Amino acid sequence: MKFKKMMAVALIGLGTASVLAACDSGKDTTTASEKESSEKTTEKTTVNFWHSMSGVNQEALNKIVTGYNNSQSKVEVKAEFQGTYEESLPKFQSVGGTKDAPTIVQVQEIGTKMMIDSGFIEPMQKFIDADNYDTSDLEENIANYYKVDGKFYSMPFNSSTPVMYYNKEAFKKAGLDPENPPQTFEEIEKAGLAIKKSNPAMKGFALQAYGWLYEELLANQGSLLMNNDNGRSKTPTKVAYDNAAGRSIFEWAEQMIKDETFANYGTNADNMVAGFINGDVAMFLQSSASAGQVIDGAKFEVGEAYLPYPEKAEREGVVIGGASLWMSKGKETAEQEAAWDFLKYLATPEVQAEWHVATGYFAINSKAYDEAIVAEAYKKKPQLKVAVEQLQATKTSAATQGALMNMLPEERKIMETALEQVYNGAEIEPTFKAAVEQVNQAIEQANRANKK
């Protein structure tokens, strides 16, 4: 800039001394307004991303965020761990609609209706429509959960379903076919008896007292959790599982307790996984996202199988678990557009393939399964394919779409308590009836609060 100014001075007839003086001054002649304009041009837009991923999942997420930040020069995503889903959601609710709210927040799937009703979010469909973004590559059964009234309010991200993990060596010892795992409640009961006979120190089966697993076992029978099409046609007014399907899960556990083949870990998933790895129990249900931990931790060959169902029912399939990503309302347009660019990056086949292999969560983009990294991972851990095949075999219905209601976290806690009581000797009928009444009361209270 200074050289150009010197030439301009010379051309209008100033003397050599003036030119030399200009050269020797050493001063920056850039104006304050020019500096400010230049800084704004090069300054990155910051996207604050609140998440609940920990351990290896957090490592995988941080790697993806770093990859995005290094792939372009306009956006800087800052990923911040905010505790578990149960801890993060109240934090977001306390700052939603203010300048302290994050640009993006990860919320558990059962928080969907709560987030929609909050008034703190910008529907993701707004950005999908404005960008003519093609959602056809999103895994159908994942998209079905997060589409409400035909539109996306959030972007699917870490999705999982439960599977059954089993000890192939224990199966062989019990005379069971390790390549043909049990599919029904009754077959699992029989397998448990055979395992107990072959190894009295090993229990046959464990079912964590976990509301999510209860919901999944209902859905796999084609049974709804809530009335009004699981809250998909209109707001639920009561539970829909006060029936044989709802009781069947309690009765199944009780039968195995009587057979002394049931391992009671209560609500503690970590102890259950440890029990399986240590050879204390031969079969258990848990998230497909636990595959890496279970397979790598066991000293025996681990099998994976579909979620079981009662023999009188037909397999319907599974409901999506995990979480999705939400855009905060009230942020500047540039910040929201930067966040949308990041979300599109997350959904690419390459990134989703990396995420699937590193964590065990599904790839939300179906094309990710064609990536070489996935094929290589399946060679090493063919078990990973089971959850994907189970998801893709799921029949689309109100049951497998999952329930929408803003009090679902409370419903889960109530059913977990009921399951744990039965595991510890309580009678099924009064325990089940009390739980149903409590959930119905919670639904009624939530509906009254929403009308105010």
Image: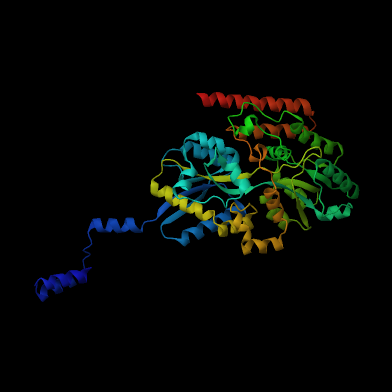
Residue 21: x, y in percent?
14, 72
Q: State left or right for residue 171 relative to residue 331.
A: right
Query: What residue is shown at x 70% (from left), y 33% (from top)?
Result: 417
User: In which quadrant of the rendered image does the N terminus lie?
Assistant: bottom left
- One can see residue 108 in this view: no
Residue 315: x, y in percent?
75, 42
Tell me which corner region of the image, top left, top right, bottom left or bottom right, holds residue 38: bottom left
**Residue at the farthest bottom position:** 16
Q: State left or right for residue 246 relative to residue 404.
A: right
Tell me which corner region of the image, top left, top right, bottom left or bottom right, holds residue 357: bottom right
Query: 373 above or below 239?
Result: below
Query: What residue is shown at x 75% (from left), y 33% (from top)?
Result: 245
Residue 79: x, y in percent?
50, 51
Q: State left or right for residue 330 relative to residue 427.
A: left
Query: 101 above or below 359?
Result: above
Q: How many marks?
A: 0
Say which of 262 and 451 sits in front.
451
